[in-house]
Image (tube, coloured by chain):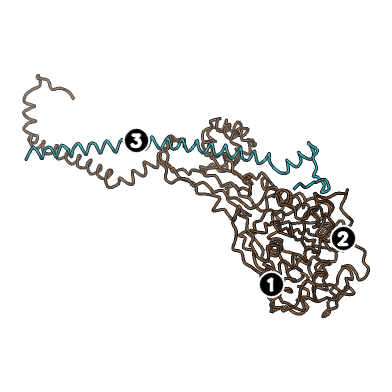
Chain colours: A brown, B cyan
């Protein structure tokens, strides 16, 4: 503003004075305007501070406050002795904001090299997704390698901690444990069954972040992370490995298609081992045929064949019509033409006691017994032992098997059911049924959790169970179907072989067999029960006693030693065998005991 | 009468001031403690992770298959035959 000079004519001032409004009027205008302006400001301030406060506060916070997940690790799975079977270890996943990385295009080759991927491919991927803000560059890297990538300091490249599951026992435990997907959720097996227990809940915290997304300060914890809980299984890693290697050796030797073995603790129903072949490596899932991932001992069913006979005998002894020694059953000729069906044995066994039917595994004898007892009793006994219903172990995909209701059985079907055709069961069901006999008729439903015993129930009288045990001991004596293959030196063995034709489309296959063995040790005070099924052995014998019997004996021999179960048959090779020495066995090899099913046929025809 | 009123006023003023300072102090304290908590939690996580890794390593070394192979092949060990075992009572 130019200062007025005193030399200016006074007339001008006078004119202005006369023409303009009075000073007080001007004052009013100015004050009014200023007042309105400040009122407007106050109103705006009120609007911002009071009316819109929440909105602006939220918007402000959103610019720098973030809620971040706190990752938690999945619980470890231990075996019954505390050995880890599945462990989660941290890995880093590298992610990027594509447009930010593309702004520094010259550094892409360097980034690609650190990530171990092709530079052109990386650039292609970034360009393809340049409209997004998040792209995984590589998931689940080793922490050291991931740190090297982050140390390059390329803008827009970030790391995120994740967990990866490792299975130290690999393919030996894979069917039982199952596996998790890349987001650490159980997909199969116990990982799926106990996913909620194992996975825990990620926590959440509020942090202050700068423009680049780096965390400046942790402000507060929104909710605390809840790490996954550990799980202790009933599996014994040593027994599991033993079962795996013996089963594998037997399958390789006989060139069989597949096989399964289950070992249970007789007193508790705990699963000590469960193996299946073929198997897969859960640490490297790509390229495994999906069929190999099936836990065959629980998802696949087979016809039990002769291994069902002890259950039939349980019904027969309960009926009161049969005892272990009477009545005598005539199986002469080895054939029984019953209602147009040829039921036959491998040999002509002549007249047998009920015990003899088990010892020699006579189909004719079993058919006679089945047709003599009450249908309702037979059906109820089969059902009670768990056939046709799931064991309720909680395992995903468990099969219940198939057993038609007793009311629909025909006479011929009933006779055939007596020697194990016309129904199908899982290996676990078979093992559980034998465990019931072994524990004096008390059934402990199988469980995979250490100490996770299910409610036990008594199925048959202890007296009948004892009689069954002594009948099953006879199969391992010379002249029984399991001798000498199921012998365990210094221990008594009770068990039963089974050799069943495999059902195929339109009937039974002539030369495809399932070779089974189920039994328990020590017979005088049973502790362990096992069932072995080997499917379609192609080389050598196909008899259950010869193919599956040795697997049973070798695994049990090792397991008895590992679990410190005292011998009950010192100095003997088999039940009732001659005592060789008070302190053990002598001689260079076991006594001769030809397997009766392998022996030359004197009459009748082999199946 | 007037003096008492002024005194009460003063006390209330002091109390309000003290409470305001208290809020500031506790908030600061909670920040400091949260930072310590986070550090300790991170430390715990690191230790847990280290433990998990060691556990995995141990499990891998103690794998029955490895022990079996080493015993049989490197050390030439065999399972004793039943007739080689003496039972002592």
**Residue count near mark 2 (Cα–Cα under 10 Å), binned few <14, some 14–19, many ≥20:** many
Q: Quadrant of residue A543?
A: bottom right
Callout 2 and callout 1 share a chain: yes
C-alpha separation, residue under disc 2 versus residue under disc 1? 31 Å
Callout 3 and callout 2 share a chain: no
Tell me the element at label 2.
Answer: loop
Q: In the rendered structure, are the residues bearing label 3 and label 2 in contact, judged by CB atoms less than 8 Å apart?
A: no
Q: Name the residue nearer the viewer: A131 or B32.
A: B32
What percent of the width, then of the height, locates residue A293?
69, 54
**Residue count near mark 1 (Cα–Cα under 10 Å), binned few <14, some 14–19, many ≥20:** many
Q: Can you say whether B68 is above or below A498 in the image?
A: above
Callout 3 and callout 1 share a chain: no
Q: Name the residue nearer the viewer: A54 or A573.
A: A573
Q: Residue at x 77, y 64 (%)?
A: A472
Q: Can you say whether B89 is above or below A548 in the image?
A: above
Chain designation of label 3: B
C-alpha separation, residue under disc 3 versus residue under disc 2? 85 Å
Can residue A503 be spotted in the picture?
A: no
What percent of the width, then of the height, locates residue A580?
85, 52
- Residue linked to disc 1: A381
Can residue A389 be spotted in the picture?
A: yes
Numbered badge on residue A595: 2
Chain designation of label 2: A
Q: Give the left or right position of residue A70, taking residue A491 as reference.
A: left
Q: Earlier in the sequence, mark 2 or mark 1?
A: 1
Numbered badge on residue B28: 3
Q: Name the residue nearer the viewer: B37 or A386.
A: A386
Chain designation of label 1: A
What percent of the width, then of the height, locates residue A142?
61, 37
Q: Give the left or right position of residue A178, taking residue A551 as reference.
A: left
Q: Give the left or right position of residue A218, taking residue A294 as reference.
A: left
């Amino acid at each position: 503003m130019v200062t007025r000079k005193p030399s200016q004519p006074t007339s001008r001032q006078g004119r202005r004075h006369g023409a303009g409004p009075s000073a007080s009027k001007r004052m009013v205008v100015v004050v009014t305007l200023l007042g309105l302006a400040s009122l407007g400001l106050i109103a705006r301030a009120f609007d911002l501070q009071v009316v819109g406060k929440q909105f602006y506060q939220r918007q402000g916070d959103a610019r720098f406050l973030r809620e971040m997940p706190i990752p938690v690790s999945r619980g470890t799975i231990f075996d019954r002795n505390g050995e880890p079977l599945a462990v989660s270890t941290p890995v880093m996943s590298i992610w990027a904001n594509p447009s930010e990385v593309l702004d520094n295009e010259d550094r892409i080759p360097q980034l690609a090299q650190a990530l171990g991927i092709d530079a052109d491919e990386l650039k292609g991927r970034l360009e393809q997704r340049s409209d997004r803000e998040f792209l995984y560059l590589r998931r689940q890297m080793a922490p050291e390698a991931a740190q090297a990538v982050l140390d390059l300091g390329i803008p827009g490249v970030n790391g995120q901690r994740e967990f990866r599951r490792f299975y130290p026992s690999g393919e030996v435990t894979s069917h039982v444990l199952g596996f998790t997907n890349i987001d650490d959720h159980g997909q199969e097996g116990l990982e799926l069954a106990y996913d909620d227990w194992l996975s825990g809940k990620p926590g959440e915290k509020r942090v202050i972040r700068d423009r680049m997304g780096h965390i400046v300060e942790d402000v507060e914890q929104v909710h605390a992370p809840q790490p996954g809980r550990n799980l202790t299984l009933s599996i014994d890693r040593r027994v599991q490995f033993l079962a795996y290697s013996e089963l594998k050796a037997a399958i390789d030797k006989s060139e069989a298609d597949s096989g399964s073995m289950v070992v249970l603790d007789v007193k508790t129903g705990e699963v000590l081992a469960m193996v299946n072949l073929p198997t897969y490596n859960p640490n490297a899932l790509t390229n495994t045929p999906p069929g190999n991932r099936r836990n065959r001992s629980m998802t696949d069913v087979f016809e039990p064949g002769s291994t069902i006979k002890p259950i039939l005998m349980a019904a027969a002894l309960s009926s009161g019509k049969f005892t272990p020694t009477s009545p005598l059953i005539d199986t002469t000729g080895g054939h029984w033409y019953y209602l147009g069906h040829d039921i036959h044995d491998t040999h002509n066994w002549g007249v047998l006691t009920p015990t003899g039917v088990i010892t020699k595994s006579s189909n004719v004898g079993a058919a006679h017994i089945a047709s003599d007892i009450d249908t309702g009793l037979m059906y109820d006994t089969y059902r009670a032992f768990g056939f046709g219903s799931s064991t309720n172990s909680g395992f995903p995909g468990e099969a219940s098997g198939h057993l038609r209701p007793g009311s629909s059985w025909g006479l011929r079907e009933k006779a055939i059911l007596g020697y194990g055709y016309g129904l199908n069961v899982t290996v676990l069901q078979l093992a559980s049924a034998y465990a019931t006999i072994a524990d004096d008729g008390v059934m402990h439903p199988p469980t995979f959790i250490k100490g996770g015993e299910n409610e036990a129930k008594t199925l048959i009288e202890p007296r009948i169970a004892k009689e069954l045990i002594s009948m099953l001991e006879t199969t391992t004596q010379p002249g029984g179907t399991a001798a000498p293959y199921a012998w365990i030196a210094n221990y008594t063995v009770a068990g039963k072989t089974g050799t069943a034709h495999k059902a195929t489309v339109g009937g039974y296959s002539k030369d495809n067999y399932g070779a089974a063995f189920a039994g328990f040790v020590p017979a005088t005070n049973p502790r362990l029960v096992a069932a072995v099924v080997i499917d379609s052995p192609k080389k050598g014998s196909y008899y259950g006693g010869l193919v599956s019997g040795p697997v049973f004996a070798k695994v049990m021999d090792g397991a008895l030693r590992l679990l410190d179960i005292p011998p009950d048959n010192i100095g003997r090779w088999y039940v009732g065998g001659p005592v060789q020495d008070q302190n053990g066995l002598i001689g260079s090899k076991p006594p001769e005991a030809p397997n009766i099913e392998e022996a030359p046929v004197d009459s009748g025809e082999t199946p | 009468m007037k003096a008492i009123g002024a005194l009460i006023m003063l006390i209330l003023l002091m109390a309000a001031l003290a409470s305001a300072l208290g809020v500031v102090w506790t908030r600061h304290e909670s920040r400091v403690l949260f930072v310590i908590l986070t550090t300790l939690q991170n430390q715990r996580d690191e230790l847990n992770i280290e433990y998990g890794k060691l556990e995995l390593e141990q499990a891998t070394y103690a794998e029955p298959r490895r022990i079996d192979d080493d015993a049989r092949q490197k050390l030439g060990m065999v399972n004793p035959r039943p007739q080689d075992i003496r039972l002592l009572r």
